[in-house]
């Protein structure tokens, strides 16, 4: 069975990614009024990876780190296409696909309900090995819909990549294992904590 997640705790790429996210204001800290995350969890910290689209230097470096990570962990020869999850995963999928000249797709949370009633957009052949890309993961629950949508369209999906994995909420390991996928990521909450302490970012939060 594929691993639920790979081991990427507190390494150089994780720490660098965390510093980049801190530098562009993507790490939001609100202990007195916790954020409600997509998965429904309450958290004093919210990581807004969507901000990366507006910062070219940070964007280019994060994508460079992502490509290096994926080449080592999977190998792009083993990836036929890159699919972005609606909506935050779409730009990351496009950048990664462009960096390695791979076909790009995107997958909706549900079929659009008109026209072709498609859940997956782009040209995909049955049996293609598709890497699902999202901005972040909490407990992994939102990934089920995307993986199921791609598989129902004929894709082989065994790898998911996210820029940030909280790694602090229960259920992620079980969800990934149940899907039969490996979750790859650059940074975790531990990386953000370490980077924030080293750079004294907490005073800015």
Image (tube, helix red, strand yellow):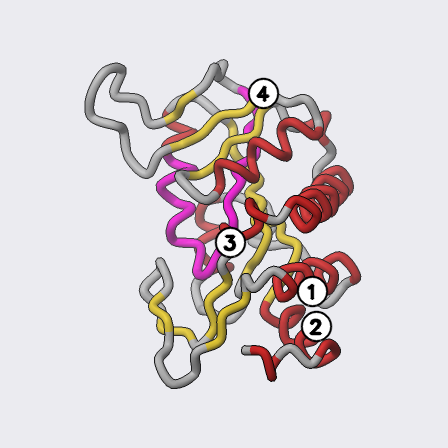
Crowding at label 3, few (<14), some or many (≥20) Cα neighbours within 10 Å? many
Q: Residue at 41% of width from left, 40% of height from top?
A: 87
Foreground label between 2 and 4: 2
How far across and how far down the image is residue 199, in percent?
72, 76
- Vertically, is 202 above or below 21? below
The span picked out in magenta is: 128-148
Q: Which residue is mark 1?
A: 19
**Residue 49 falls inside the magenta stretch:** no
Circle 1: element type: helix
Q: Earlier in the sequence, mark 2 or mark 4?
A: 4
Q: Earlier in the sequence, mark 3 or mark 1?
A: 1
- Vertically, is 190 above or below 61? below
The label number, if any, that marks residue 103 in the structure image: 4
The label number, if any, that marks residue 195 in the structure image: 2
Q: Residue at 33% of width from left, 27% of height from top?
A: 119
Q: CA distance from mark 2 to mark 4?
A: 35 Å
Q: CA distance from mark 4 to mark 3?
A: 22 Å
- Vertically, is 104 above or below 40? above
| Side (left or right) of 18 relative to 123 | right
Contact between labelled residues 3 and 2, with CB atoms less than 8 Å apart: no
Q: Nearer the viewer, residue 139 or 66?
A: 66
Does any portion of residue 1 appear in the rendered image? no
The label number, if any, that marks residue 136 in the structure image: 3
Q: Which image quarter is the N terminus in?
A: top right
């Amino acid at each position: 069975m594929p691993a639920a997640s790979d081991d990427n705790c507190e390494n150089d790429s994780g720490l660098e990614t965390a510093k980049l996210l801190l530098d562009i204001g993507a790490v939001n800290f609100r202990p007195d009024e916790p954020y409600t995350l997509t998965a429904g969890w309450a958290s004093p910290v919210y990581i807004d990876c969507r901000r990366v689209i507006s910062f070219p230097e940070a964007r280019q470096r994060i994508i460079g780190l992502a490509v290096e990570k994926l080449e080592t962990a999977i190998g792009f020869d083993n990836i036929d296409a890159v699919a972005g999850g609606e909506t935050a995963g779409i730009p990351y999928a496009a950048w990664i696909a462009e960096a390695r000249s791979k076909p790009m797709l995107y997958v909706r949370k549900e079929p659009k309900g008109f026209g072709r009633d498609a859940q997956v957009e782009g040209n995909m052949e049955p049996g293609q090995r598709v890497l699902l890309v999202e901005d972040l993961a909490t407990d992994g629950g939102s990934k089920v819909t995307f993986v199921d949508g791609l598989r129902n369209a004929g894709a082989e999906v065994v790898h998911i990549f996210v820029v940030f994995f909280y790694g602090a909420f229960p259920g992620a390991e079980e969800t990934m294992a149940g899907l039969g996928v490996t979750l790859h990521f650059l940074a975790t909450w531990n990386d953000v904590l370490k980077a924030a302490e080293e750079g004294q970012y907490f005073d800015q939060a």
